[in-house]
Structure formats: C-alpha cells, structure tokens
Amino acid sequence: MRFDICTLFPDMFTSYFSDSILKRAKDEGLIEIRIHNIRDYSKDKHKKVDDTPYGGGAGMLMTAQPLYDCLMAVKKINSGPVVFMTPQGKKLTHTHAKRLAMNNESLILLCGRYEGIDQRIRDLLVDKEISIGNYVLTGGELATMVVVDAVSRFIPGVLGDEASAEEDSFSRRLGGKKEYPHYTKPAIFEGLEVPAVLRSGNHAEIAKWRKEHLR
Ligand code: 4G3
C-alpha cells in the first residue's frame, strides 16, 4: 500500500516513519511512503504558500496554486483518493482504518496548516475528509501520521508473525472490549505483585483470569 503525503513540513515525518514497526514495513515493501513538500510547487518568487482570507478574519490560508500543482503531480503517480485531514472530516475508527487497509487502495494525504486551505482545492481535488478526533491541531501532519500508522497495522505482515491487529484492543475476539492488564518481570515491583495465576503456567486459568479482567 502506498501513501503519498503532501505537507509544508516534510521533516516532521522522518523520525516517526524511520523508527520501529513502520520502518520494517517499508524495508519489506509492505508499505511505501513518499513525502512531498508543497512549498516546492509554489510559483511565487519567494515560494509563498499562504495569504489572507477574502472577507477578512484571523490568520492565513494556504493558497490554491501550490496545493493544486502538488496534488496534480502526485495524482500522476498515485491513483488513490485525495484525503484531507480536517477536524470536520469523518472520524477515524478501528473499522474505518481496517477497511482502508483491506481495500489496499493507495492514499494521497493532504496536511493543512494555518487556518485551513482555499475552498477551491476541496471542491476540485479532495475526495474525502478524515478527522482523528474532535480537537484542532496546528497542522494536519500529526493526524496524517495517525492515519498511516493505524491503517498500516492492518496490512498483513506489518505487525509480524505472532501479533495481529485483530488480537488488539477493540477487536471482536475480545468481545469489543479493550484489554486485560499486562505484566512482565519482575514479579514484585514497588511492593505490587503480579497475580499468581499469571505465573502458574495453567493456560485455562490464565485465559479465565484475562476474560474476567477485560476492561
Ligand atoms: C483544516 C486535522 C486543517 C482546517 C487537522 C485545521 C485537527 C485535525 C487544519 C483546520 C488539524 C483532526 C489542520 N487539526 N482532528 N489541523 O483530524 O481548521
């Protein structure tokens, strides 16, 4: 699955996507992530990418031209939908992330900054709008990282052999509930002991205990 990300802050993505599980997924060719700097597409002599809103109001908007040229260039290499990250979008859920991964459809993710983008880019080029929750961030970059991470976990092979996204929180296997408490060594920490049943080796009792402690 391929993700093309359009942003004014490409450096924000490098450490997140160069670490841990997503790095391995990239190295194994399970996902491909390409970052595109919207500023590179500005035709302004000072590479300007923002301007004041018509009608007045606080702050700046991202102008249409660099966004248009960036998205049109990316659409030539990625045939998937253009997704704009915005607090007004459809809320991302477990099911939604899974569906995006199962469709195995590549995505073009657009990160907004300032007070938003010129509406004509939405009208012309944006296919869907996704939100990671009811709050406003200073930019769409964090929201985009959340989408890429949550979707990638559902791509077969990304989590490795034993682990599966379906064994995690919110999966139906756990009755739609969250999780049971986890413990690792040492057996006693700050006077708190790991429940004896988890150290008993009795798998039936362990399963029973975990079921009783789902929350
Ligand atoms: C557009 C996404 C973009 C309009 C983006 C702010 C929160 C989310 C932005 C706007 C974002 C989210 C950039 N903040 N909840 N900030 O998914 O007002």
Image: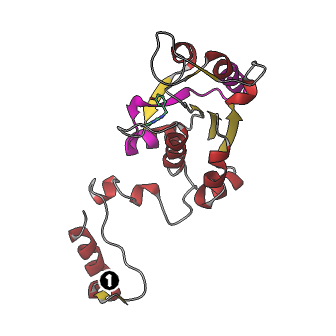
In the image, 85 versus 100, the foreground residue is 85
Q: In which quarter of the image is residue 71?
A: top right
Q: Indicate left or right for 185 with 101 as reference.
A: left
Counting labels gives 1
Q: Quadrant of residue 47?
A: top right
Q: What residue type is labelled 1?
A: Leu
Q: Indicate left or right for 22 with 89 as reference.
A: right
The crowd level at tag 1 (other Cα within 10 Å; few <14, some 14-19, many 20+) is some
Magenta range:
69-98
Residue 200 placement (x, y as % from top left)? 32, 89
Quadrant in the picture for the C terminus: bottom left
**Residue 31 visible to an observer of this rendering:** no
**Residue 184 visible to an observer of this rendering:** yes
* Furthest-left residue in this view: 212
Q: Indicate left or right for 120 with 204 as reference.
A: right
Residue 80 part of the magenta-drawn span: yes
What residue lies at 56% left-to-right and 33% top-to-bottom?
111
Residue 63 part of the magenta-drawn span: no
Which residue is the site of mark 1? 198
